[in-house]
């Protein structure tokens, strides 16, 4: 029978780890120290043949696959092939994707021996114990008979008996969170990967689209254990710990206890990610967030919709006014990244309603706005109401919405295109200043992104991979075309090119370009810096002498500073200084200062500067201050960045 067990995870990306298989192994090893239990992690981007080869080389007697909507197709492919190359290996599945129709899956997939439903720690340990006991060579019974006798008594499994009949045992008991061991012994293997942590299971809410609503009880890990385990991460300066609690802040004492601990023991490096309901925050919790180091925590807030009819229909409880006030207050602290979510395809929400939800959330100024699409999960209340909602969705994972009574497939396509634009131009954080100016040209944010998506489609840019620089060129092309339409171009008009407005956009684009990095290449619309090279050189020479604006460069001379920082002459007559040694702790953008330059030599007027911009300088390309020193005046940033 079984001596060697393998728990296999096929993750969405390399940076992800699978906490489930680690937790199953840790729990089982405490009860079965003699068991040989290995873990193998792969990604959906691996060639399936390579995964098959790796599992074959391990020669396991038992393989358990962790199944989710993002990997179930790959798991089925592996299961079918694995049974051909390792016919004696017992194959079991577990996870949310197989827990709610286990009998059907076993009837369709004859290679699978059994399925562990629901939480797996206790169930897997009992199944492993059954296989080990069946291996007892001193027992008189046949090993298969001994195994079946034990499987009959294990709750939480669906399996094949000796005659091939499918049997489903009752549900497994839920463990206390303190019964589940902490499975991180060291951080080997987790370098450059997201580290997950669980301080509670279950959810107090009943959102119809979510599987967590099935188990309405919430179990918490003791705060004393949680603090001890968080110290493990803090002492090792783990870059990020992502809590997988469904609603982290549903118990005030639990939330405050954990936040106070990480605040008091902050190592200056580790970031903690929490999924929260912002409308539940009270004053003490909000005040505590305000005292945190920038980047100590980040919050993921599921809004899903601002349509009250939709919120009621999906059985969600949310006070939108309180949520908005909390988000606004945290935003004012400038120390916490906030990620707000919306779901398209929910009941009672058509295109216009969803766009209103988008506009409402966009105006809350989240650091990221995820425009997601409804996944109709097996076992969810939403799946049971598909007929009533006219809900059509893909028949293969991830079971994403295609249309509803309120939202057509054509609308879904438009929102998909809009989602890409939001991801590229808003969530990347690389175009924030340009977007702030561009938003003023539209009655609503959603119209801006729909218009931009249409531009991509009309010009053949949609569906292609573009470099960072190309995204700037495309956005400028979009802005230029729009401004020209406003001025009557393409309609037989003789209106001049809207240079004044376009110059403001070019300045914002250049500011955004250099905020993230000292770009070595420049877009085609960038103003020639040649006429300003003497003035820029003068700035860094003055800084070498006075050490006024770049304190982090005190050990560098003017040439080194000019290479390490960047000073950009803008079309509005100002200069922007980008300091890459001093960055924003949340977005990692360069510290930015804006200057104007006052000539000390006579004969320089604004008109001369305008001619320089157009390459018409009387000095043949040398700026008018080249003959003498000027005075640099720091002025406020136009963008407010």
Image (cartoon, rainbow, N blue to C red):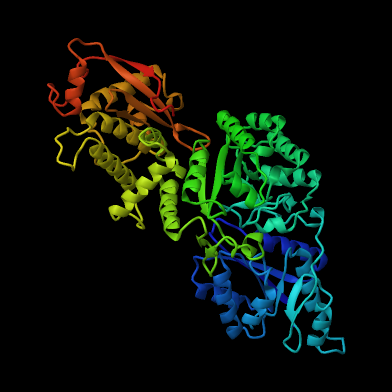
Q: Is residue 2 visible?
A: no
Picture coordinates of residue 281 (x, y %)?
68, 36
The answer to which of 296 and 160 lies nearer the viewer is 160
Give residue 611's quadrant in the image.
top left
Residue 194's x, y, as percent?
59, 52
Residue 156 seen by the camera: yes
Residue 543, percent across and down?
Answer: 36, 21
Tell me: residue 5, above or below residue 390.
Answer: below
- 609 relative to 228 in the view: left or right: left
| Front residue of this view, candidates 6 and 106 | 106
Q: Is residue 432 left or right of residue 339?
A: left
Q: Position of residue 284 (x, y in %)?
A: 72, 30
Image quadrant in which the N terminus is located: bottom right
Residue found at x 31% / y 48%: 470
Quadrant where the C terminus is found in the figure:
top left
In the image, residue 249 above or below residue 329: below
**Left or right of 458, for residue 7:** right
Q: Quadrant of residue 56?
A: bottom right
């Amino acid at each position: 029978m079984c001596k060697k067990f393998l728990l296999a995870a096929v993750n969405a990306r390399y940076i992800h780890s699978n906490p489930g298989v680690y937790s199953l192994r840790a729990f089982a090893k405490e009860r079965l120290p003699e068991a040989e239990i290995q873990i193998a992690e792969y990604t959906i981007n691996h060639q399936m043949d390579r995964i098959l080869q790796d599992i074959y080389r391990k020669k396991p007697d038992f393989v358990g696959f962790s199944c989710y909507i993002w990997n179930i197709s790959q798991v089925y492919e592996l299961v079918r092939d694995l049974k051909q190359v390792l016919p004696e290996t017992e194959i079991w599945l577990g996870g949310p994707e197989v827990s709610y129709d286990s009998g059907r899956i076993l009837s369709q997939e004859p290679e699978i021996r059994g399925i562990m439903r629901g939480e797996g720690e206790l169930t897997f340990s009992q199944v492993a114990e059954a296989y080990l006991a069946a291996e007892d060579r001193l027992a008189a019974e046949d090993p298969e008979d001994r195994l079946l006798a034990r499987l009959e008594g294990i709750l939480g499994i669906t399996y094949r008996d000796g005659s091939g009949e499918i049997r489903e045992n009752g549900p497994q008991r839920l463990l206390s969170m303190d019964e589940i061991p902490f499975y991180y012994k060291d951080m080997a293997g987790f370098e450059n990967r997201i580290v997950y942590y669980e301080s509670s299971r279950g959810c107090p809410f009943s959102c119809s689209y979510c599987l967590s609503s099935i188990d309405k009880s919430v179990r918490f890990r003791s705060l004393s254990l949680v603090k001890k385990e968080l110290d493990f991460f803090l002492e090792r300066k783990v870059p990020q710990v992502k809590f997988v609690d469904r609603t982290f802040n549903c118990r005030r004492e639990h939330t405050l206890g954990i936040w106070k601990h990480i605040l008091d023991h902050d190592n200056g490096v580790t970031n903690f990610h929490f999924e929260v309901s912002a409308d539940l925050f009270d004053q003490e919790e909000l005040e505590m967030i305000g005292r945190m180091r920038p980047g100590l925590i980040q919050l993921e807030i599921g809004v899903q919709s601002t349509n009250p009819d939709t919120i009621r229909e999906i059985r969600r409880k949310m006070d939108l006014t309180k949520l908005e006030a909390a988000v606004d207050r945290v935003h004012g602290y400038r120390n916490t990244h906030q990620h707000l979510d919306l779901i398209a395809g929910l009941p009672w929400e058509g295109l216009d309603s969803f766009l209103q939800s988008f506009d409402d959330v966009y105006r809350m100024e989240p650091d990221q706005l995820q425009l997601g699409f409804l996944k109709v999960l097996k076992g969810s209340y939403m799946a049971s109401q598909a007929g009533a909602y006219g809900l059509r969705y893909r028949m293969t994972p991830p079971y994403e919405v295609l249309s509803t009574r309120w939202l057509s497939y054509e609308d879904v396509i438009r929102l998909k295109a809009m989602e890409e634009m939001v991801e590229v131009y808003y969530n990347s954080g690389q175009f924030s200043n340009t977007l702030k100016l561009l938003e003023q040209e539209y009655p609503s944010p959603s119209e801006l992104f729909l218009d931009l998506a249409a531009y991509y489609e009309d010009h053949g840019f949609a569906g292609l991979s573009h470099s960072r620089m190309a995204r700037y060129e495309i956005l400028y092309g979009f802005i230029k075309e729009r401004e020209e339409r406003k001025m009557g171009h393409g309609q037989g008009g003789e209106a001049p090119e809207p240079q004044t407005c376009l110059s403001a956009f070019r300045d914002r684009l250049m500011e955004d370009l250099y905020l993230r990095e000292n770009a070595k290449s420049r877009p085609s619309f960038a103003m020639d810096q040649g006429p300003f090279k003497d003035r820029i050189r003068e700035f860094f020479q003055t800084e070498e002498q006075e050490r006024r604006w770049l304190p982090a460069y005190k050990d560098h001379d003017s040439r080194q500073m000019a290479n390490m920082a960047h000073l950009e002459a803008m079309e509005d007559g100002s200069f922007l200084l980008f300091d890459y040694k001093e960055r924003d702790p949340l977005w990692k953008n360069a510290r930015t200062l804006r200057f104007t330059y006052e000539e000390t030599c006579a004969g320089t007027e604004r008109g001369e500067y305008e001619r320089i911009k157009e390459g018409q300088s009387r000095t043949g390309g040398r700026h008018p201050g080249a003959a003498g020193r000027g005075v640099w005046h720091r002025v406020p940033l136009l963008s407010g960045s």
